[in-house]
Amino acid sequence: MTLHVAPITTADIPAVARFLHEHLNDRVTADAWERAVQVPWKVSAPNHGFLLRDSATGEVAGAYLAFYSERAGRRFCNLGAWCVLPQHRFHSLKLLKALLAQEGHVFTDLSPSGNVVPMNTRLGFEFLDTATAVAPNLPWLPVRGRLSVDPAVLESTLRGDDLQIYRDHAGTAAARHVLLRRRDRYCYVIYRTDRRKDLPFFASLLYVSDPELFRTMRRRLQNHLLVRHGIIALLAETRVAGHRPRLSRMLPNPRRKMFRGDVAAQDVDYLYSELTCLSW
């Protein structure tokens, strides 16, 4: 069998989606993979990642997804799902090298598996501070202020970059949007549901626009997560939340997140990425 590396084009997406459903995570349907790859925000993307293809049959033998965005004058490439058939794992690194050969991008890897972490380190990736507190969601007494998930309220309240972020992510599969308001201030929160020990009862913070207001209104969000969605715990990276919630404990081994490029760690966030586009 002769394999070759090629960019994932729009025409390749259905075949790549079926491949990832069958060989990486069958909890994610092929349709869901397909929707995730085609991001809703505006971006001039060179590809959707790279694939390994059997030159004789045209069958996909491996894929490494990429999610592109342009933000604050920088071009970002978020490395997504990576899967190669076991008999062709020797060729896996070709996909990563093809992605990293694209100059002018800041690269992020926000869900690297255990064996990918040392490989990324050798290739110049740095670690983000992912110190994470897990806080139980309890039926707290109401705190002052209001909470809304109404799209019309979000559209009419958010301003500037927050409004653009909402519009760019409103159609993504994994991002969940909440507006916390008190007097003339708001805090826009984006979270995703996550699994721990295969239990889908956790909410991970992805974006907090006003950490100070979030600190005072966090219990209202936690009450909402528990009562409305049955989510039992909040996973709050301190760099995102801005504080460690009370009654929480720090995870001994938080999930790693990495980046490479001409950017400061504090300027790397989790938006415009696989974390917002794909639920697993």
Image (cartoon, rainbow, N blue to C red):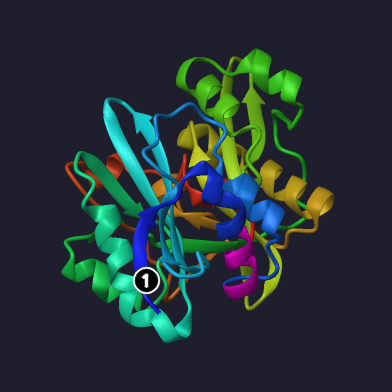
Label 1 crowding class (10 Å Cα cut-off): few <14, some 14-19, many 20+? some
Location of mark 1 (residue) = 3
130 above or below 276?
below
Q: Is residue 200 left or right of residue 121?
A: right
* Secondary structure beneath label 1: strand
62 above or below 270?
below
Q: Is residue 259 visible?
A: no
261 above or below 109?
above
Which residue is at the front of the view, 70 or 225?
70
49 above or below 247?
above
Q: Position of residue 264 (x, y in %)?
A: 21, 43
Would residue 209 be counted in the magenta stretch? no
Q: Position of residue 232 (x, y in %)?
A: 72, 63
The residue depicted at 32 percent of the width and 81 percent of the height is 90
Query: Looking at the rendering, in which quadrant would you find the C terminus?
Result: bottom right
Q: Is residue 103 visible?
A: yes
Q: Position of residue 67 (x, y in %)?
A: 44, 45
The residue depicted at 53 percent of the width and 54 percent of the height is 245
Range shown magenta: 17-23
The residue depicted at 64 percent of the width and 72 percent of the height is 22
The residue depicted at 62 percent of the width and 50 percent of the height is 34
Would residue 22 be counted in the magenta stretch? yes
Residue 173 location, quadrant: top right
Q: Is residue 133 left or right of residue 76?
A: right
Which amino acid does the dot numbered 1 rest on?
A: Leu
Q: Is residue 20 left or right of residue 145?
A: left
Q: Position of residue 138 (x, y in %)?
A: 74, 58
